[in-house]
Image: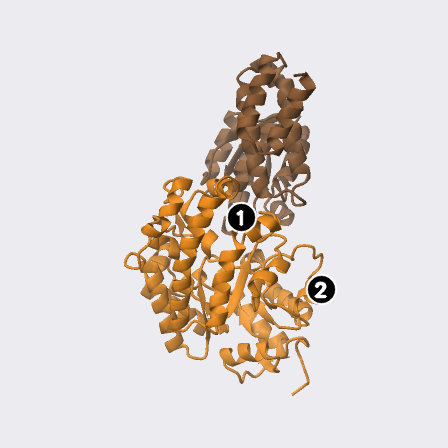
Amino acid sequence: MTKEEILQRLKDSVLKYDNDAAKAAAQEAIKAGIDPLDALKNGLYPGLKEICDHFEETVFLTDMLLASDAFYSGAEVLKAKINPAKAKANRKGIVVLGVIEGDVHDLGKNILKYLLEAEGFEVHDLGFNVPVKKFIEEAHKLEADLLMVSVMLSSKFPLIEKIVNLAKETEMKAKIMVGGGPVTDEIAKQYGADGWALTGPLAVKEALKLVEKTK
Amino acid sequence: MKECQEYMTPEERIIGLIGHKKLDRIPVFPFVSAASAQVRRLDYGEYAKKPEVFLRCQIEAQQLIGYDAITAMPDLCVEAQGFGAKIIYPSDNAAYPDPFNPVLKSADDYKNIGKLFSWDRAERMKNQLQVIKTIRKELPGLMVGGFTIGPMGLISRLRNINELVRDFVHNPDKLHEACEIVTEIQLEYVEKQLEAGARTIMVPVVLAEREVMSKAMWEELDAPYQKRIADLVAKKGGIYAVHICGRDPYFDLLIKWLHPLLIQNAHLPDGIKTEEEMVEKYSKKLLFLGYLSVSQLAWMNPTEIMDECKRQIGVFGKARSGYFLGASCEYPPYAPLYNAMAVVKAARVYGANFKAGVGANCEEA
């Protein structure tokens, strides 16, 4: 099988949400001597990118989760073979991600995590019900470029301001992005966040822009 | 500000709206539910766990604020409790099932879902029936509504949501089996609520939206079960209301499958760009149940709320089947009740002499 055929198989496995096919194609790539980073970037990633590009047209939240699962199945095999120095050199940025204190809705956050990792971010997922202080502490500790906070309950909007204020007080380097069902651009601005996005794919684009600003 | 003279009971007002009669004012439904805990300065955990307290708060909040309809619902975990879900009652927000210990741990558990439920165990469902009966008795002119979370909504309270979404594609047959069983139990619950005095039954149909799944998937997975509930409500002479608060709801499919009389939506329907277009395209077939957003009710001041109500009456008052002034989702539990009062005041000031399809200040007798 040629390199092009293996890359196509990787891409197709994501488009078909086929976890087993993704793993098998990843193993095939390694066996064929393809650079695992190349296989990730030019095989699995284009599949997920194609899904994201059609979100809310012919592709829905359900598809994003399943395509991400397939991406991960293949990526796990490839990542084990990627040289850590090379992975670091290709890293787009460090993200700390979590769902705000008092909120347990994590579906959107999980999908975003997958999309960010596929894009090349190093993501540190703090899970759900994350206290304000914890977000800030982790962002400092990891020297994050971006702090991404998911908020599905409008009652938790004032906590965005608390995060923003604590970030200023502690001179946090990371930019702050917020998102989630009830959060709008206006709400994000009102509470002082640096960025906002309506959907997962748009959040990845916004993350890339914001990370550029921190450099 | 001059307020109108009220001469109709809430129930007369709502029936009049549906029947295209001229009303003293536009009906109001701010969907105050958990927020009513504020009238007794209770935290939400205390309120949701004690049915007698819940009931008194519901009644006192209506008497204080003066809205026309109640949908008695402490939170979205009433039915899940009957299936053995461990419910967490935070002091500052709505109750939710323990995310670390879902009742359905794998797709293989779906087939046994019926064995998890018993009416003996379902204290919260039984309490709701009592709540409906008592409100009906103590506030006889009020429109009292019942509620069921719907089959897939209930399953989402019993299974990790990420896994449920995977089951939509990987285990549809097992999911169908669970939906069959759950729907039967919910039909019984709906019937009991109607017998207890509920005039409307509200069902969240939150999967029927572009953000979540395709139209084909919704029709395959969720629609047949939701239809059975809608059909039962209609057969029993109740008013069936759909609640849908996600982006781009599939109004066309909701009409095709469920024929709701009322719809409460937080975002414009799929394919619709403006509020005016929504009124133009769908108001012949649906009666709109409020459009004030959760954020507006929580964070605007009463003057801003009244201005927004005036604007919305101007736009949605033209809806041919009718329109309630009110919230597009449950009134935020933490939002100040003075904003609910502002909504009622706005109805009295800007919604006087209201008629479906004409709007306020209708001259026709």
The image quadrant that residue B62 belongs to is bottom left
Question: Is B269 situated above or below B351?
Answer: above
Residue at the disc numbered 1:
A157
Residue positioned 37% across, 58% down in the render: B48
Question: Is B168 situated above or below B242?
Answer: above
Residue at the disc numbered 2:
B276
Residue B333 in percent (x, y) is at 46, 58
Q: Colour of chain A?
A: brown
Q: Are marks 1 and 2 on the same chain?
A: no
Residue A175 in percent (x, y) is at 61, 34
The image quadrant that residue B206 belongs to is bottom right
Is disc 1 placed on a helix, strand or loop?
helix
**Tag 2: Cα neighbours inside 10 Å, few (<14), some, or many (≥20)?**
few
Q: Which residue is nearer to you in this view: B133 or A46?
A: A46
Can residue B150 be seen here? The reply is: yes
Number of marks in picture: 2
Question: Is A29 situated above or below B107?
Answer: above
Q: Assign the C terminus of chain B to one quadrant of the image.
A: bottom right
Residue A5 relative to residue B125: left or right: right
**What amino acid is at disc 1?**
Phe
Is disc 2 placed on a helix, strand or loop?
helix
Residue A93 in percent (x, y) is at 61, 26
Residue positioned 41% across, 77% down in the render: B139
Residue positioned 55% across, 51% down in the render: B220
Residue A140 in percent (x, y) is at 52, 28
Task: Report the residue that reaches farthest toward the bottom.
Answer: B365
**What amino acid is at disc 2?**
Glu
Q: Colour of chain B?
A: orange
How far is disc 1 from disc 2 in space, using C-alphas? 30 Å
The chain to which mark 2 is attached is B
Can residue A211 be seen here? The reply is: no
**Tag 1: Cα neighbours inside 10 Å, few (<14), some, or many (≥20)?**
many
